[in-house]
Amino acid sequence: MKRMLLAAVAAIALSGTAGAETIKVGVVGPFSGPFAIQGKNFKAGIDAWMALNGAKVGDDDVEIVYRDLPAANPAQAKALAQDLVVKESVQYLAGFYFTPDAMAVTPLLEQANVPMVIMNAATSAIVTKSPLVVRTSFTLWQTSVPMAKVATARGIKKVITVVSDYGPGVDAETAFATTFKADGGEIVESVRMPLSTTDFSPIMQRVKDSGAEAVFAFLPSGPTTLGFLKSYNENGLKGAGIQFLAPGDLTQESDLPALGDTALGVTTTFHYSVAHDSPENKKFVEAARAAIGNPAELSFPSVGAYDGMRVIYKMIEATGGKQDAAKAVDAVKGMAWESPRGPVSIDPESRHLTQNIYLREVAKAADGTYYNKEIQTFANMTDPGLAAAK
Ligand code: PHB
């Protein structure tokens, strides 16, 4: 450290400016296994950002160091983050698809002097675990409150909730139920499934038997969301007139080809549709599709990663490349920009994004591809879950 400092002082004395450094960003995500497409989307978003904005901030080079975490595994997440900090000397930690992984890493940040930019994990409470957490994704509270409003507006009175039994599932259930009940609706049953559940037929039977007019569901996007929606169709719930309500995790774009026409008309609430109509999104989608290779695989984790990189670049700029986590995080509080998803800003208190949430409907384009068509906007939502998380 002392030697590095002396070398830096010498460099400044010689040239009048600090020498160029390489700033490393450690990104943890599912790059193999059943959730590999989600990790591929992190990388596509990061690559798109760097293709459009370069791999340098000022004189400093930015280098991304990837670590693979195929499934939710807090102990492994912690070990990977420690390794990135100690062995790779990363100045920033980013990525994190699953909530339990992000939660496990928050206790390391202050001692390591490293900010964490969460590109997906969506349980409201994560940002309260360390002042060095900034999030560029969404929360289940942000997406589920509008869905409850939509259900009420449609005249639905009785709903059964079905969620994965972990952080974001519990948040989705609580957000939906609290809002729906406050507006006069009834939750007839609340089902929590283990994350590992793959056979949904027994659950579909419970939904049918519950007497509900609609099912509100959340599972983390991946093979099981596809399985869940397929099971809803195959078990005749749609035919029985039981409406499907969910946040957009359930109709991510990469699942739509496999769902085909059965998904047409399914409505969800979410922060990002690949089809969002704006110049900013067109530019992003073009770069991200080039990065991911197969355009049909592009989905929401890419936009969390793209915006996360914008935040990290701002942090590097604000600290002049020096490792100062508190200064880096302070510099992005209140930051506002036009994201591919729409206008966003970082709430200075929560360090989470204020953003629009859209009601969307699965539709078919003229070329036969499926997309999430935005039909209503819930503008400028802060995270309603923060009060609940405290
Ligand atoms: C999470 O674990 O926080 C998570 C994962 C996937 C989603 C949403 C939330 O689609």
Image (cartoon, helix red, strand yellow):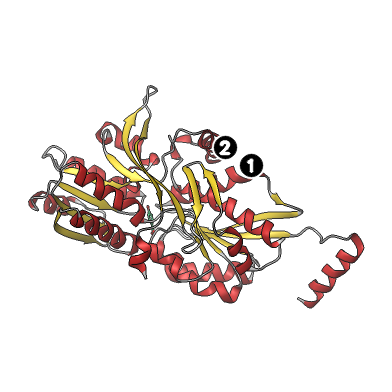
Q: Residues within 10 Å of mark 1 (few under 14, many from 20)?
A: some
Q: Quadrant of the C terminus?
A: bottom left
Say what amino acid the circle numbered 1 marks: Ala
Beta carbon at label 1 within 8 Å of ligand 1:
no
Label 1 secondary element: helix
* Residue 361 found in image quarter: top left
Q: Where is ligand 1, by quadrant? A: bottom left
Vertical placement of residue 187 versus 78, above or below: above
Expressed as whole percent of the image width and height from the top left, the position of residue 127 reads 45, 65
Q: Residue furthest right?
A: 14
Q: Quadrant of the N terminus?
A: bottom right
In this figure, which residue is indicated by the disc labeled 1? 51
The residue located at (44%, 45%) in the rendering is 300
Say what amino acid the circle numbered 2 marks: Ala
The residue located at (68%, 56%) in the rendering is 317
Label 2 secondary element: helix
Does residue 224 appear to the left or right of 111 in the view shown? left
Expressed as whole percent of the image width and height from the top left, the position of residue 279 reads 53, 33
Vertical placement of residue 239 versus 163, above or below: above
Q: Residues within 10 Å of mark 2 (few under 14, many from 20)?
A: some
- Marks 2 & 1, CB-CB < 8 Å contact: yes
Q: Earlier in the sequence, mark 2 or mark 1?
A: 1
Expressed as whole percent of the image width and height from the top left, the position of residue 277 reads 45, 33
Q: State the mark number for residue 287.
A: 2
Does residue 386 appear to the left or right of 154 in the view shown? right
